[in-house]
Image: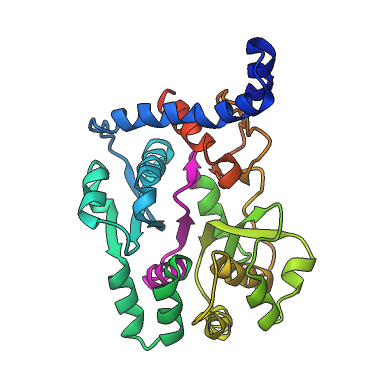
Amino acid sequence: MDLKRDLRTKLKLPEKIANSLAFRIPTLFKAVLYFQNLFVMKRVSKDPWDLNMVLLCGSKNIAFLQEVLKSIYTNFSRTPNIFVITDNSTNVRFCKEKIKWFPKDRLTLITANDCLDYHKAKGRNSLFNFASRNPMGLKLAAILQIAEIGKPLLYSDTDVLWLQDPFELIQQLINSVGANINLSFDFQPAYDEQLVSMARLESLLNKAPYYCAGIMLIKNFSSENIQLIERLLPFLEKQSNHFSEQTIFATLQKSVGPSRLEQEKFSIILDDQFDLRPLNRPKLIARHYIGPVRHLFWRDAFFMVKK
Protein backbone atom coordinates (compact mmCIF):
# COMPACT_ATOMS: atom_id res chain seq x y z
CA MET A 1 0.00 0.00 0.00
CA ASP A 2 1.40 3.44 -0.84
CA LEU A 3 1.73 6.14 1.80
CA LYS A 4 -1.08 8.30 0.47
CA ARG A 5 -3.60 5.47 0.62
CA ASP A 6 -2.24 4.34 4.00
CA LEU A 7 -2.68 7.81 5.50
CA ARG A 8 -6.22 8.05 4.18
CA THR A 9 -7.44 4.61 5.25
CA LYS A 10 -5.74 4.22 8.66
CA LEU A 11 -5.90 7.84 9.81
CA LYS A 12 -9.03 8.74 7.85
CA LEU A 13 -7.43 11.88 6.49
CA PRO A 14 -8.84 13.83 3.55
CA GLU A 15 -6.99 13.22 0.32
CA LYS A 16 -5.57 16.76 0.19
CA ILE A 17 -4.00 16.45 3.67
CA ALA A 18 -2.71 12.93 3.00
CA ASN A 19 -1.19 14.17 -0.23
CA SER A 20 0.53 17.04 1.56
CA LEU A 21 1.95 14.77 4.29
CA ALA A 22 3.29 12.35 1.70
CA PHE A 23 5.41 15.17 0.29
CA ARG A 24 6.39 16.76 3.61
CA ILE A 25 7.41 13.72 5.66
CA PRO A 26 10.64 13.18 3.62
CA THR A 27 11.91 16.50 5.02
CA LEU A 28 12.39 14.57 8.28
CA PHE A 29 14.82 12.30 6.46
CA LYS A 30 16.60 15.39 5.16
CA ALA A 31 16.88 16.76 8.70
CA VAL A 32 18.38 13.52 10.00
CA LEU A 33 20.89 13.50 7.14
CA TYR A 34 21.83 17.10 7.96
CA PHE A 35 22.81 16.14 11.52
CA GLN A 36 24.64 13.04 10.29
CA ASN A 37 26.67 15.29 7.98
CA LEU A 38 27.94 17.24 10.99
CA PHE A 39 30.13 14.24 11.74
CA VAL A 40 33.10 13.08 9.68
CA MET A 41 32.39 10.26 7.25
CA LYS A 42 34.25 7.04 7.96
CA ARG A 43 37.22 6.93 5.59
CA VAL A 44 37.54 3.82 3.45
CA SER A 45 40.58 3.32 1.25
CA LYS A 46 39.61 2.53 -2.34
CA ASP A 47 41.57 2.20 -5.55
CA PRO A 48 41.34 5.13 -7.98
CA TRP A 49 39.22 4.86 -11.12
CA ASP A 50 40.76 6.36 -14.24
CA LEU A 51 37.52 8.10 -15.12
CA ASN A 52 36.54 11.76 -14.82
CA MET A 53 33.16 12.56 -13.27
CA VAL A 54 31.49 15.97 -13.50
CA LEU A 55 28.90 17.49 -11.15
CA LEU A 56 27.39 20.98 -11.43
CA CYS A 57 26.40 22.66 -8.16
CA GLY A 58 24.49 25.84 -7.33
CA SER A 59 23.97 27.42 -3.92
CA LYS A 60 20.61 25.66 -3.49
CA ASN A 61 22.07 22.25 -4.35
CA ILE A 62 24.88 21.85 -1.80
CA ALA A 63 22.80 19.52 0.39
CA PHE A 64 22.11 17.40 -2.72
CA LEU A 65 25.81 17.49 -3.61
CA GLN A 66 26.72 16.10 -0.19
CA GLU A 67 24.38 13.14 -0.67
CA VAL A 68 25.37 12.33 -4.25
CA LEU A 69 29.03 12.36 -3.17
CA LYS A 70 28.15 10.07 -0.25
CA SER A 71 26.41 7.70 -2.67
CA ILE A 72 29.51 7.65 -4.89
CA TYR A 73 31.87 7.23 -1.94
CA THR A 74 29.73 4.48 -0.40
CA ASN A 75 28.72 2.45 -3.44
CA PHE A 76 31.51 2.82 -5.99
CA SER A 77 34.19 0.13 -5.69
CA ARG A 78 36.72 2.62 -7.10
CA THR A 79 36.84 6.38 -6.79
CA PRO A 80 36.80 8.47 -10.00
CA ASN A 81 38.30 11.92 -10.41
CA ILE A 82 35.43 14.18 -9.38
CA PHE A 83 35.13 17.70 -10.81
CA VAL A 84 32.54 19.90 -9.12
CA ILE A 85 31.71 23.00 -11.15
CA THR A 86 30.14 25.73 -9.00
CA ASP A 87 27.90 28.36 -10.52
CA ASN A 88 28.12 32.06 -9.64
CA SER A 89 25.48 31.74 -6.91
CA THR A 90 27.70 29.41 -4.87
CA ASN A 91 29.90 30.41 -1.96
CA VAL A 92 32.93 28.29 -2.85
CA ARG A 93 34.39 28.38 0.67
CA PHE A 94 31.09 27.17 2.14
CA CYS A 95 30.85 24.44 -0.49
CA LYS A 96 34.41 23.25 0.25
CA GLU A 97 33.63 23.10 3.95
CA LYS A 98 30.57 20.92 3.36
CA ILE A 99 32.44 18.33 1.28
CA LYS A 100 35.85 18.45 2.96
CA TRP A 101 35.45 14.83 4.07
CA PHE A 102 35.77 13.58 0.47
CA PRO A 103 39.32 12.45 -0.49
CA LYS A 104 41.09 15.64 -1.57
CA ASP A 105 43.21 13.91 -4.21
CA ARG A 106 40.03 12.79 -6.03
CA LEU A 107 38.06 16.05 -5.88
CA THR A 108 38.55 19.34 -7.77
CA LEU A 109 36.36 22.43 -7.52
CA ILE A 110 36.19 24.71 -10.55
CA THR A 111 34.33 28.02 -10.36
CA ALA A 112 32.02 29.28 -13.06
CA ASN A 113 34.42 32.12 -13.83
CA ASP A 114 37.35 29.73 -14.24
CA CYS A 115 35.31 27.59 -16.61
CA LEU A 116 34.15 30.61 -18.61
CA ASP A 117 37.69 32.02 -18.80
CA TYR A 118 38.92 28.65 -20.08
CA HIS A 119 36.60 28.79 -23.08
CA LYS A 120 36.95 32.53 -23.64
CA ALA A 121 40.71 32.09 -23.97
CA LYS A 122 40.04 29.58 -26.74
CA GLY A 123 37.80 32.03 -28.62
CA ARG A 124 34.57 30.11 -28.06
CA ASN A 125 32.36 33.16 -27.96
CA SER A 126 29.00 31.47 -28.57
CA LEU A 127 29.64 28.94 -25.81
CA PHE A 128 30.88 31.72 -23.50
CA ASN A 129 27.74 33.78 -24.08
CA PHE A 130 25.40 30.81 -23.56
CA ALA A 131 27.22 29.65 -20.42
CA SER A 132 27.33 33.18 -18.98
CA ARG A 133 23.56 33.52 -19.17
CA ASN A 134 22.28 30.04 -18.43
CA PRO A 135 23.41 27.51 -15.75
CA MET A 136 22.70 24.73 -18.22
CA GLY A 137 25.06 26.44 -20.63
CA LEU A 138 27.64 26.32 -17.86
CA LYS A 139 26.96 22.60 -17.56
CA LEU A 140 27.75 22.15 -21.26
CA ALA A 141 30.88 24.30 -20.92
CA ALA A 142 32.05 22.29 -17.90
CA ILE A 143 31.58 18.97 -19.67
CA LEU A 144 33.46 20.20 -22.75
CA GLN A 145 36.30 21.50 -20.56
CA ILE A 146 36.77 18.25 -18.64
CA ALA A 147 36.36 16.16 -21.80
CA GLU A 148 39.42 17.91 -23.22
CA ILE A 149 41.54 16.23 -20.53
CA GLY A 150 41.23 13.22 -22.83
CA LYS A 151 39.60 10.62 -20.57
CA PRO A 152 36.09 9.12 -20.57
CA LEU A 153 33.64 11.24 -18.62
CA LEU A 154 30.63 10.40 -16.48
CA TYR A 155 28.21 13.25 -15.80
CA SER A 156 25.65 13.22 -12.98
CA ASP A 157 23.12 15.84 -11.93
CA THR A 158 23.16 16.52 -8.19
CA ASP A 159 19.62 15.10 -7.86
CA VAL A 160 20.93 11.66 -8.81
CA LEU A 161 21.80 8.96 -6.28
CA TRP A 162 24.18 6.14 -7.16
CA LEU A 163 22.63 3.11 -5.50
CA GLN A 164 25.01 0.42 -6.76
CA ASP A 165 28.53 0.15 -8.11
CA PRO A 166 28.60 1.04 -11.84
CA PHE A 167 32.28 0.16 -12.36
CA GLU A 168 32.01 -3.06 -14.36
CA LEU A 169 29.15 -1.85 -16.55
CA ILE A 170 30.71 1.55 -17.30
CA GLN A 171 34.08 -0.05 -18.10
CA GLN A 172 32.37 -2.48 -20.47
CA LEU A 173 30.70 0.42 -22.28
CA ILE A 174 33.98 2.34 -22.48
CA ASN A 175 35.91 -0.62 -23.83
CA SER A 176 33.32 -1.86 -26.32
CA VAL A 177 32.36 -0.63 -29.77
CA GLY A 178 29.29 1.59 -29.86
CA ALA A 179 28.03 5.12 -29.38
CA ASN A 180 30.64 7.46 -27.88
CA ILE A 181 27.88 9.48 -26.18
CA ASN A 182 25.32 7.75 -23.96
CA LEU A 183 22.45 9.60 -22.25
CA SER A 184 19.87 8.28 -19.84
CA PHE A 185 16.34 7.89 -21.19
CA ASP A 186 13.36 10.15 -20.58
CA PHE A 187 9.66 9.26 -20.64
CA GLN A 188 8.77 12.38 -22.65
CA PRO A 189 10.46 14.93 -24.91
CA ALA A 190 11.74 17.71 -22.63
CA TYR A 191 13.51 19.99 -25.08
CA ASP A 192 13.91 23.65 -26.00
CA GLU A 193 11.11 23.98 -28.56
CA GLN A 194 12.43 27.29 -29.89
CA LEU A 195 15.82 25.74 -30.58
CA VAL A 196 14.09 22.73 -32.14
CA SER A 197 12.20 25.06 -34.47
CA MET A 198 15.09 27.34 -35.39
CA ALA A 199 17.59 24.52 -35.94
CA ARG A 200 15.00 22.21 -37.56
CA LEU A 201 15.34 19.41 -35.02
CA GLU A 202 11.69 18.31 -35.13
CA SER A 203 12.61 14.61 -35.12
CA LEU A 204 13.55 15.00 -31.45
CA LEU A 205 9.91 15.72 -30.61
CA ASN A 206 8.23 13.41 -33.05
CA LYS A 207 9.95 10.11 -32.45
CA ALA A 208 11.05 8.17 -29.37
CA PRO A 209 13.38 7.38 -27.71
CA TYR A 210 13.64 10.62 -25.75
CA TYR A 211 16.75 11.47 -23.78
CA CYS A 212 17.63 13.16 -20.51
CA ALA A 213 21.03 14.74 -19.81
CA GLY A 214 20.87 14.04 -16.05
CA ILE A 215 23.17 11.01 -16.41
CA MET A 216 25.63 10.74 -19.29
CA LEU A 217 28.63 8.64 -20.22
CA ILE A 218 30.82 10.38 -22.79
CA LYS A 219 33.79 8.41 -24.10
CA ASN A 220 34.93 11.39 -26.16
CA PHE A 221 33.67 14.11 -28.48
CA SER A 222 34.45 13.48 -32.13
CA SER A 223 35.15 16.34 -34.54
CA GLU A 224 31.65 15.78 -35.96
CA ASN A 225 30.16 16.11 -32.47
CA ILE A 226 31.97 19.40 -31.92
CA GLN A 227 30.84 20.73 -35.30
CA LEU A 228 27.23 19.92 -34.42
CA ILE A 229 27.54 21.70 -31.07
CA GLU A 230 29.09 24.73 -32.77
CA ARG A 231 26.23 24.81 -35.28
CA LEU A 232 23.61 24.94 -32.52
CA LEU A 233 25.28 27.32 -30.06
CA PRO A 234 24.66 30.59 -31.98
CA PHE A 235 20.91 30.03 -31.58
CA LEU A 236 21.37 30.17 -27.79
CA GLU A 237 23.60 33.19 -27.28
CA LYS A 238 20.74 35.57 -26.46
CA GLN A 239 17.79 33.31 -25.63
CA SER A 240 17.72 29.85 -24.08
CA ASN A 241 15.91 27.91 -21.37
CA HIS A 242 16.36 25.08 -18.89
CA PHE A 243 16.18 22.45 -21.65
CA SER A 244 18.53 24.05 -24.21
CA GLU A 245 21.62 22.07 -23.24
CA GLN A 246 19.59 18.85 -23.01
CA THR A 247 18.36 19.50 -26.54
CA ILE A 248 21.97 19.71 -27.74
CA PHE A 249 22.93 16.47 -26.01
CA ALA A 250 19.82 14.67 -27.30
CA THR A 251 20.68 15.83 -30.82
CA LEU A 252 24.20 14.46 -30.37
CA GLN A 253 22.76 11.17 -29.15
CA LYS A 254 20.50 10.84 -32.17
CA SER A 255 23.46 11.56 -34.45
CA VAL A 256 25.68 8.79 -33.00
CA GLY A 257 23.05 6.11 -32.46
CA PRO A 258 21.00 4.75 -29.55
CA SER A 259 22.24 5.18 -26.00
CA ARG A 260 23.62 2.07 -24.31
CA LEU A 261 22.69 3.15 -20.78
CA GLU A 262 19.97 0.63 -19.99
CA GLN A 263 16.76 2.26 -18.83
CA GLU A 264 16.14 -0.19 -15.99
CA LYS A 265 19.61 0.59 -14.57
CA PHE A 266 19.73 4.37 -15.03
CA SER A 267 16.20 5.62 -14.51
CA ILE A 268 13.66 8.29 -13.92
CA ILE A 269 10.93 6.62 -11.83
CA LEU A 270 7.58 8.22 -11.00
CA ASP A 271 5.38 5.37 -9.77
CA ASP A 272 6.41 5.56 -6.09
CA GLN A 273 5.61 9.24 -5.64
CA PHE A 274 3.66 8.69 -2.38
CA ASP A 275 5.61 5.73 -1.01
CA LEU A 276 8.02 6.09 1.91
CA ARG A 277 9.15 2.48 2.00
CA PRO A 278 12.81 1.88 1.03
CA LEU A 279 13.34 1.65 -2.72
CA ASN A 280 13.44 -1.96 -3.93
CA ARG A 281 14.76 -2.06 -7.51
CA PRO A 282 17.56 -4.66 -7.55
CA LYS A 283 18.75 -3.77 -11.06
CA LEU A 284 18.82 -0.01 -10.50
CA ILE A 285 22.29 1.57 -10.46
CA ALA A 286 21.40 5.27 -10.49
CA ARG A 287 18.12 7.10 -10.05
CA HIS A 288 17.36 10.64 -11.22
CA TYR A 289 14.87 12.39 -8.92
CA ILE A 290 13.13 14.92 -11.14
CA GLY A 291 10.58 17.44 -9.81
CA PRO A 292 7.53 15.25 -8.98
CA VAL A 293 9.63 12.77 -6.97
CA ARG A 294 12.47 14.99 -5.74
CA HIS A 295 11.24 14.61 -2.15
CA LEU A 296 12.07 10.89 -2.43
CA PHE A 297 15.74 11.77 -2.92
CA TRP A 298 15.91 12.23 0.87
CA ARG A 299 14.10 8.97 1.56
CA ASP A 300 16.53 6.96 -0.55
CA ALA A 301 19.58 8.86 0.71
CA PHE A 302 18.46 8.09 4.27
CA PHE A 303 17.91 4.38 3.72
CA MET A 304 21.15 4.13 1.74
CA VAL A 305 23.03 5.40 4.82
CA LYS A 306 21.13 2.95 7.04
CA LYS A 307 22.23 -0.09 5.00
- Determine whether, in the image, residue 229 is placed left or right of residue 4: left
Left or right relative to 190: residue 33 = left
> From the image, which quarter does the N terminus lie in?
top right
Quick check: is 152 in the magenta stretch? Answer: yes
**Residue 228 location, quadrant:** bottom right
| Frontmost residue, 266 versus 119 | 119
Q: Is residue 71 magenta?
A: no
Q: Which residues are magenta?
A: 139-167
- Figure check: 20 above or below 246: above
- Left or right: 202 in relation to 265: right
Q: What residue lies at 55% left-to-right and 44% top-to-bottom? A: 289
Q: Residue at x 48, y 66 (%)?
A: 136
Residue at image position (65%, 54%) is: 185
Q: Is residue 300 above or below residue 171?
A: above
* Residue 69 sits in quarter: top left
Q: Quadrant of the C terminus?
A: top left
Residue closest to the far top: 10
The percent coordinates of residue 47 (x first, y second) are: 32, 44
Q: Nearer the viewer, residue 36 or 255?
A: 36
Who's the residue at 28% across and 59% down the image? Answer: 109
Q: Position of residue 247 (x, y in %)?
A: 61, 69
x and y, in percent, of residue 145 in the image = 38, 72
Toward the viewer: 157 or 148?
A: 157
Tell me the colour scheme of the image: rainbow
- Above or below residue 133? Residue 299 is above
